[in-house]
Image: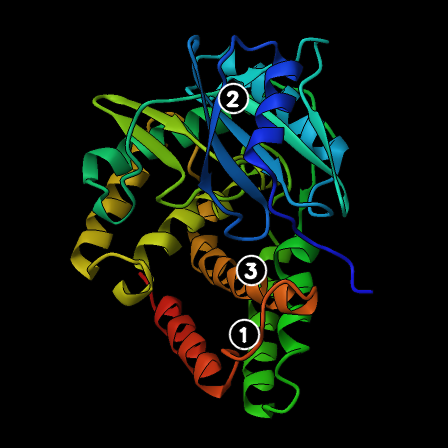
Amino acid sequence: MFPIVHSTLSLAALQEVVSAGYGLPRPVTLRYWQSAQSGGNDLYLVSTDAGKFMLRIYVHGNTAVDALAAQIEVLEQLATTGIRLPRVVRLRDGKVILRISVPEGTRYAMLTEFIKGDVPGGSITDAEAQAFGAALATFHRSANALAVDLRLPIHDREYLLDEPLGVLTGYCVEMPVIQQYLAELSASIAREIEALDTAAPAFGLCHGDAHKSNLLVDNEALTLLDFDCMGYGWRAYDLATFRWSISRPEWFGGLRADRARSAWDAFLDGYAADHALTAEMLQSLSSFVLVRHLWWMAIDLRKIRDGKIGASWLNEEWWEKQRKILDELRVLS
């Protein structure tokens, strides 16, 4: 029998588990909000007479409970510094992680306050990009004062480049031109990032997924979202993730070239006003933009490997499209 990797949860049963676990006033209603887009977690909107909350339920086998606990503890510390992020709601017994028994085993969940606002995404303005840069800088600066929690992942060369590359090359063995391209590209990237400083301010706690849709904007207020990729690494990767998200082709979710340039300049202005932006960080950005795209490419291939999605879309045309995107990202100035 094949293992079950993801099961649909009963809303009625889940409502009972959440109500009892958190002691929320009844009636409690749940609405399925968003499915696991990258294999990470499902989101549910929880509504009660006491207000609204967001329930995040992690796919079985995708999250280490120790890393999730560390993530929550770090975020609770950062919240005391004034950074706007969703506050975690504790269970009746004081714990922060809800365990849900499902056919495949245990799925972990966390409940946070509901934050009003809109995700700008492709409509992001220069003012919002600048505010995002400032918020990310505050996150980096405030994190420098926290003790390192080694339960969180280390975003080193192996995590960012070598492991994703291993996944990619395993699926293009019959395309030697693509394999050679990836080998040459990764070797060039590796030489640059291996020489980078591994001390603060260049290296430290990172958001890990700081793209243009991981923020909420409500009038003047900006809230950072989605810390599931949080770990310790080069801060330039956080900045490069935002640039990747706006500079990739429009058909692939990016912005028009002139808008991307303007938003990027505004983002850097916002960041530099609150955190050191060294020459080394700026020089490494182009490599980390490529790292981010390679890392993204490997996400769906892992799903194929793990039997979560089909592979009918994976063909030579897909590889050629990705190579073209990488070539365009290589010449960003």
In the rendered image, residue 99, in percent from the top left (x then y), is placed at: 73, 29
Q: Outermost residue toward the right?
A: 1
Q: Earlier in the sequence, mark 1 or mark 3?
A: 1
> As drawn, is 111 to the left or to the right of 129?
right
Residue at the image position 73 percent from the left and 55 percent from the top:
4
Do we see residue 110 in this rendering? yes
What residue would you read off at disc 2? 112
Tag nearer the camera, 1 or 2 = 2
Q: Earlier in the sequence, mark 1 or mark 2?
A: 2
Q: CA distance from mark 2 to mark 3?
A: 28 Å
Q: Secondary structure at mark 3?
A: helix
Which amino acid type is shown beneath numbered disc 2?
A: Thr
Q: Secondary structure at mark 1?
A: helix
Q: Quadrant of residue 203?
A: top right
Q: Which mark is residue 185?
A: 1
Q: Secondary structure at mark 2?
A: strand
In the rendered view, tell whether residue 203 sits above or below residue 292: above
Query: Marks 2 and 3: CB-CB under 8 Å?
Result: no
Instruction: Please tell me how many numbered marks the rendered image carries.
Output: 3
Quadrant of the image for the N terminus?
A: bottom right
What residue would you read off at disc 3? 295
> As drawn, is 281 to the left or to the right of 220?
right
In the rendered view, tell whether residue 312 sits above or below residue 260: below
Q: CA distance from mark 1 to mark 3?
A: 13 Å
Q: Earlier in the sequence, mark 2 or mark 3?
A: 2
In the rendered image, residue 194, in percent from the top left (x then y), is placed at: 64, 56
Which amino acid type is shown beneath numbered disc 3?
A: Trp
